[in-house]
Image (spheres, grey):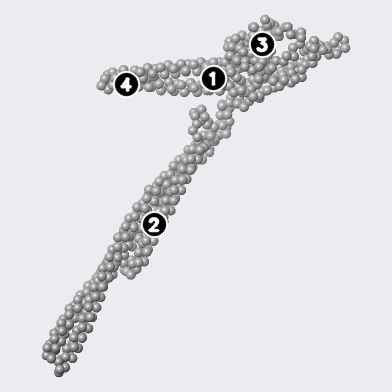
């Protein structure tokens, strides 16, 4: 079917239909625009979500648990997924929405041109009809005037009273009117023929062509809509493989969660390397009780009090049973001695590896500068060799500093490995009362496997602990010890000692992690058992 032949008289309806088609195209364009806005907003919200749950961390805070690593992998995949949503929005904006807007503008201009051509053709036909109608009316008027002249001449010609001049004048007027009527007739015939010709051209050539152009334009609009519908779907289809990979990555991350590995990481993170403390010894408080001569009654000690202080007994027991008591926060030391041996060894090894990497970079930079210097020396026009010397010197200085740091950390590593080994051997062979508290090793504090474990304070000396008969005699030394580390003795009842200082042992570790010692000057107090190397001697006396 053709609009030009079947709809030759439907110009106004075709005008409305083509306008509806453009409006529908723009409506679909608006739909695509809102869809890509949704995609952009969705992608932005996904990226913000990923950013919220994946904050920046320092290198030491990087997660190692498989559940955390898998969650980070899921966040990365989700970020890539958000990127694909952005690709969808961008492709829709460029290939669908942008194309529709450009085509809509072209379509409006083309429709306007065709309708203007149709209106011009219609106006020309109307003009031809007006010319024909005017000539027709003129011909009709001239014919009536000629008829009047004919009647006037006939009346005068039959009137015997009319003069000859009046008859001749009427005859001349008749001839004039007849001539004018003939000319009007010819003009009317010409205008009528021209109107018929233009009307035929209008309805058989011009209007069919214009309507055909409008039909082609509308069909192209329909085809364009179909293409953009397809593009709309293809944009989504093209990202499906990548989105599928993102989802597969999430599934893979979920499969990589390993509860056994996470449990092992917990052990690696918090293992101190110490052995658990031994059993608590029995404390005999009946040593100062004497029996009477024959009746077997219990006599009173020389002490005026007569009884042990129950508060003191409770206090002593309480001080010794604080295995999970509060632990003060230890300061961070350069040699990492504030950490348990196992953690200290790992941290030192990690630091040494990092320093070696930095040293290798500096060495590579030095080699590169030396090569450049050789090139400059061979080709002075390329540069001044002396200009590189400050940088080379700085690099060599950095290398020396790094080597010094590496040597220092390696000595600390060898120290912790050696001392940890020797301490383990000593503990396994010594008396059960010589076990150090679980999870402690290093100066400036005591440590446990559990970071929430409380720090134990030293036992507080009791002024009523000794009887009068022992007031003048110090406790005998049962051995001696050598300080492995310095101890500040800031707590009440503790004793300040320096590294390598030799002290007398007057009371063994009762399982609470503290040993009572005496300096050669006679000052007594408690020191951490893990800070000293103990040697027990039989029949050893203090000075």
Distance from label 2 to label 4 (Cα)? 67 Å
Residue where numbered disc 3 is placed: 524
Q: Reading the chain from its start, which is encountered first: label 2 or label 3?
A: 2
Label 4: few (<14), some (14–19) or many (≥20) C-alpha neighbours in 10 Å: some
Tell which circle, 4 or 3, labels the residue nearer the N-terminal end: 4
Residues under labels 2 and 3: Cα distance? 98 Å
Q: CA distance from mark 4 to mark 3?
A: 67 Å
**Mark 3 falls on what kind of element?**
strand
| Residue 288: image location, x then y, percent | 78, 12
Neighbours of disc 1 within 10 Å: few (<14), some (14-19), many (20+): few
Residue at position x 86%, y 9% from top? 293
Identity of the residue drawn at 37% across and 53% down: 100
Q: Which of the two discs, 4 and 1, sits closer to the camera?
A: 1
Q: Mark 1 highlights which residue?
A: 333
Which one is nearer the viewer's eye here, 480 or 459?
A: 459
Residue 206, position as x, y percentages in the image: 27, 66
Q: Is residue 331 above or below residue 251?
A: above
Q: In the figure, is residue 477 to the left or right of 498? A: right
Report helix, strand or loop for mark 2: helix
On the image, numbered disc 2 is attached to which residue?
Answer: 25
Mark seen at residue 372: 4
- Tag 1's secondary structure? loop
Q: Is residue 193 left or right of residue 457?
A: left
Measured along the vertical axis of the image, is residue 460 above or below residue 96? above
Mark 2 closeness class: few <14, some 14–19, many ≥20 residues within 10 Å:
many
Measured as percent of width and height from the top left, residue 322 is found at 68, 23
> Is residue 456 in view?
yes
Looking at this rendering, what residue extends furthest in the top direction? 543
């Amino acid at each position: 079917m053709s609009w030009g032949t079947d709809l030759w008289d439907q110009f106004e309806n075709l005008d409305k239909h083509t306008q509806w088609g453009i409006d529908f195209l723009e409506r679909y364009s608006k739909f695509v625009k809102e869809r890509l806005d949704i995609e952009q907003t969705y992608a932005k919200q996904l990226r913000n979500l990923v950013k919220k749950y994946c904050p920046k961390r320092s290198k030491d805070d990087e997660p190692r648990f498989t559940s955390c690593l898998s969650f980070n992998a899921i966040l990365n995949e989700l970020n890539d997924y958000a990127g694909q949503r952005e690709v969808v929005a961008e492709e829709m904006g460029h290939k669908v929405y942008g194309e529709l807007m450009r085509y809509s503008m072209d379509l409006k201009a083309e429709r306007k041109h065709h309708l203007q051509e149709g209106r011009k053709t219609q106006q020309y036909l109307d003009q031809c009809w007006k010319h024909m109608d005017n000539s027709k009316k003129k011909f009709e008027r001239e014919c009536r005037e000629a008829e009047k002249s004919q009647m006037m001449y006939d009346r005068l010609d039959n009137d015997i009273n009319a003069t000859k001049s009046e008859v001749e004048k009427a005859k001349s007027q008749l001839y004039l009117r007849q001539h004018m009527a003939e000319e009007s007739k010819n003009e009317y015939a010409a205008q009528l023929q021209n109107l018929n010709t233009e009307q035929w051209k209008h309805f058989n050539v011009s209007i069919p062509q214009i309507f055909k152009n409008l039909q082609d334009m509308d069909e192209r609009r329909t085809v364009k809509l179909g293409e953009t519908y397809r593009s709309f779907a293809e944009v989504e289809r093209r990202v499906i493989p990548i989105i599928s990979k993102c989802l597969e990555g999430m599934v893979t991350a979920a499969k990589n969660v390993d509860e056994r590995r996470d449990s092992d990481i917990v052990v690696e993170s918090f293992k101190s390397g110490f052995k658990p403390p031994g059993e608590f010894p029995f404390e005999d408080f009946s040593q100062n009780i004497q029996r009477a001569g024959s009746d077997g009654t219990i006599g009173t000690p020389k002490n005026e009090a007569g009884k042990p202080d129950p508060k003191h007994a409770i206090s002593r027991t309480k001080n010794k049973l604080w295995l999970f008591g509060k632990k003060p926060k230890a300061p961070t030391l350069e040699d990492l001695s504030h950490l348990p041996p196992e953690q200290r060894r790992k941290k030192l090894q990690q630091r040494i590896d990092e320093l070696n990497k930095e040293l290798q970079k500096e060495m590579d930079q030095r080699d590169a500068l030396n090569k450049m210097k050789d090139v400059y020396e061979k080709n002075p026009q390329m540069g001044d060799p002396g200009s590189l010397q400050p940088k080379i010197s700085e690099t060599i200085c950095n290398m020396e500093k790094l080597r010094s740091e590496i040597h220092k950390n390696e000595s600390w590593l060898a120290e912790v490995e050696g001392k940890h080994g020797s301490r383990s051997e000593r503990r396994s062979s010594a008396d059960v009362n010589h076990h150090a508290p679980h999870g402690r090793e290093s100066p400036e504090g005591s440590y446990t496997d559990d970071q929430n474990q409380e720090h134990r304070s030293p036992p507080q000396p009791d002024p009523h602990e000794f009887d009068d008969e022992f007031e003048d005699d110090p406790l005998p030394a049962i051995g001696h010890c050598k300080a492995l580390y310095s101890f500040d003795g800031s707590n009440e009842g503790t004793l300040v000692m320096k590294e390598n200082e030799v002290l007398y042992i007057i009371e063994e570790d009762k399982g609470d992690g503290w040993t009572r010692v005496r300096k050669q000057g006679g000052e007594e107090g408690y020191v951490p058992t893990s800070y000293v190397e103990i040697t027990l001697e039989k029949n050893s006396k203090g000075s």
